[in-house]
Each structure stands twice: as C-alpha cells, then as structure tokens.
Image (spheres, rainbow, N blue to C red):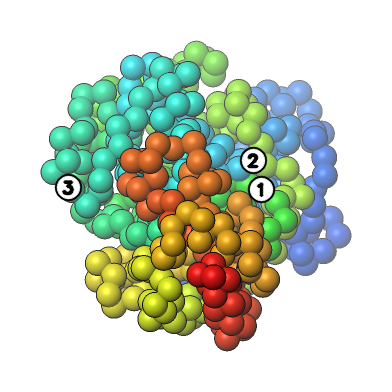
Amino acid sequence: MTDPQGPDYGFDTLQIHAGARPDPATGARQTPIYQTTAYVFRDADHAAALFNLQEVGFIYSRLTNPTVAVLQERIATLEGGVGAVCCSSGHAAQIMALFPLMSPGKNIVASTRLYGGTVTQFSHTIKRFGWECTFVDFDDLDAVKAAINDDTRAVFCEAIANPGGYITDLDAISKISDAAGVPLIVDNTSATPYLCRPIEHGATLVVHSTTKYLTGNGTVTGGCVVDSGKFDWSANDKFPSLSEPEPAYHGLKFHETFGPLAFTFHGIAIGLRDLGMTMNPQAAHYTLMGTETLSLRMERHVENAETVAQWLEKDPRVDYVTYAGLKSSPYNKRVKKICPKGAGGLFTFAIKGGYEACVKFVNALEIFSHVANLGDTRSLVIHSASTTHRQLSAEQQEAAGAGPGVVRISIGTENADDLIADLDQALSKAAS
C-alpha cells in the first residue's frame, strides 16, 4: 500500500492508506501524533550511520518525525512522485524548492498569474539571497523561452492560478523548461493531485500549501515539496548542491548517492537541517485526516463552483466570471487536458461599481466568510486588491487577475442554492 509503484490502487484508496500502517507498538489504526523532539539511538554506531546518511531513520524532529513521514509518503504517492518533504507553510515550501537550485546571481522565470504573496516573495524577499525573478505571461510561450538565460535555474507556475482560476498549459511549459535544462516547479495547491497531476505533464517538483485543500478544514498551516525523481541533476554544472561534493557530509554527492531521491534527501538533510522550516506533528495529523476525504470534497467543490459560476455569469450586476469550467472561458479547453476532473473551486468575478461595490458586497455576505484563506469546506471570499494583493502595483494586480473591481471566492461544500442566495442578497446591497 505504501509503494506508488506497487498494486494499482485507486486514488480514493491511496488517499486513506498510502504511507500509513498500524502502529507497531500499540496497533493503533490511525497514525499517532508522535509528539517528541528526539529519538533514542540503538547504539553509537547506529547514531553515526544516521548522521552520515548511511541509514534512514529518525534523529530529531526538525529533520524527521514519524507522523510527518506518513504525510510525506501519502502526498508523494498521490502526486506520483518518489518522495516529498513537508514543511511549515506553502511559502516555506517555495523556498525549500528553490534552495538547492539557487545561488547569488541566479534567477527563476515565473508566471505573472500567481498568488499575491508569491509575487511579493519572488519580487522582493528572494533578492535578499541574491536571487532574481522574471515574470512572464505564460500564455506567451515565445516570451517564456526568451526570458530563460544561462543564469536561470527554475521555471515556476501554478496549475490552477490563485486568484482567477487560470489553468496553465503545463505540457507546453514543461517542453520549454526541458529544452533549457532547468526544472519546472508547479504549485498544485488550488488543483490538488485529485484534479491535476503536474508530474504527468512534465513537472520536476510540485509544491503545496497543505493549509488549503489537502487539509480542507482551515485548522493548520503547512507546506510540501514533492520530487518527481525524473530530473538529471548531473547533466550539467547548474546544480552543484545536488551534483557536486557536499562539504557538510564529507564530500557526499547527493545525486550520485541517492539517485532519483537526491532532491528529497537534500531537502531533509540540508534544507530542514539549516532552514528549520519544520512541520509540527500535530499539523501533519490534521492534514492526514483531511487527505482521507480529499476526492469527496473536491468533487463537491467542483460541482458547487460550476453551479455558482454559471449563475453569476448570467447576473446583470456582474461584469465577468473567470472560472475555467465555464464554456465561455478562454481556458476551458485546457480543463480536459490539465484538470480532467474539473476546474477546481476557486475563481474571481468582477462586480459592476468597482472597488466600493466590492467592499459593500464583502461586508454584506452571511454564509461566505471574509478571510485570507482558500480551500476550506466553508465558502470563503476576499477582495484581493485591498488584502492579499495590496502590496502589488496596479499593473501587477491586473496581471494577476486581482483588479480593484474583482473579488475572489473559494466555493465550499455547502448547499449550492444557499450559496447563490447569499451572493444574490449581497450583490443587491452592493448595487444599492
């Protein structure tokens, strides 16, 4: 059950069982919360072997923890990867993904359609490490190619972009990154592996904010980096952290030693060791429970989103709706190819009356919660221009699909008729 190359179990089975087994000490069927910082070594030789990466095991919970390990294996299995590293948040996962690839003076090429916090992280924060980012419209494939240069170390995008629900043509982008010899990193938070499996479309690494749909109940933050195991880190000299001797481990070469699992081992042995962006075991426990119902929830999220989007599109108080599941969407044709089970539960719509109408609308909602989150079983709303995308310029807001007259909604699993009634009364108050 724990081997993604083993029996061909279905997604619904794997989301419950992958990575888990009865606790050997007690027989507990649910994965226990191993609330411990350290682990007793069998003897001095055992401790030395663990610290030398000659044996896999538990040392200290900043690095590895049994509860977190189950979640890592489960997410890796659902994504079709060889391994995964969980960490403290989705933002932490992005830094963890870039850390082994980057060095001062190097750059990444990223889509303009990204979560506002990611745009800020890539526009400002990573510059403190001497890293740079070039933002490109990923619908313009020639522009993506032109943006990649000798110092580029990764290409980054979201499968279903937050906030507008834009779907990236991962197959086309992966061909470009492959030709350039650099990894494609795909944020799959909004889609989840139930709707999209980026590795099957050429992604090298997949990142998640497990805070969102994977947990699904708005209780804990977390992040994850999934390794496809398919990239040749030794094909050139661009990735010395993975291909060259590591001084901290007596000259060990991660790719030579660990093969397809090189990135995963580096993420734990170097990334978590030195950056300390650790996921705590209780957060892992909540997320594990969330994954058990992922497919059921995503089906309802999609069903409700389609119903609500169709209603909004017909409403004269609404300028436009960005949901890719609508036949009118320019990205509708990508749904079957990239997200065959549906376009997700996240999208935006523009309210006639602009910024002030949006503020009135948000304040008038009763079922929808006004929060800076998405992917909850509860329906959520936010006015991105005044909150999550507030730090961006007007041009960046428009490019990200978060203009002043736009609100983002994350459709939950409630009764769709109740959601429509709530939207209806709030739109009436916004128009008054």
Q: CA distance from mark 3 to mark 2?
A: 33 Å
Which comes sooner in the sequence, label 3 or label 1?
3
Image quarter hosting the N terminus: bottom right
- Residue sticking out furthest to the front: 432
Residue 180, given in percent of the width and then of the height, sits at: 20, 36
Q: Nearer the viewer, residue 186 or 270?
A: 186
- CB under 8 Å between discs 2 and 1: yes
- Residue at 50% over, 70% down: 431
Q: CA distance from mark 2 to mark 1?
A: 7 Å
Q: Nearer the viewer, residue 175 or 248?
A: 175
Q: Nearer the viewer, residue 8 or 63?
A: 63
| Mark number displayed over residue 141 | 3
Q: Amino acid at mark 3?
A: Leu
Q: Is residue 46 left or right of residue 275?
A: right
Q: Nearer the viewer, mark 3 or mark 2?
A: 3
Relative to 319, does residue 169 appear above or below in the rendering?
Answer: above
Residue at the disc numbered 1: 221
Residue at the disc numbered 2: 88
- Indicate the quadrant where residue 296 lies: bottom right
Q: Amino acid at mark 2?
A: Ser
Q: Secondary structure at mark 2?
A: loop
Relative to 419, does residue 48 appear above or below in the rendering?
Answer: above
Q: Is residue 413 left or right of residue 342?
A: right
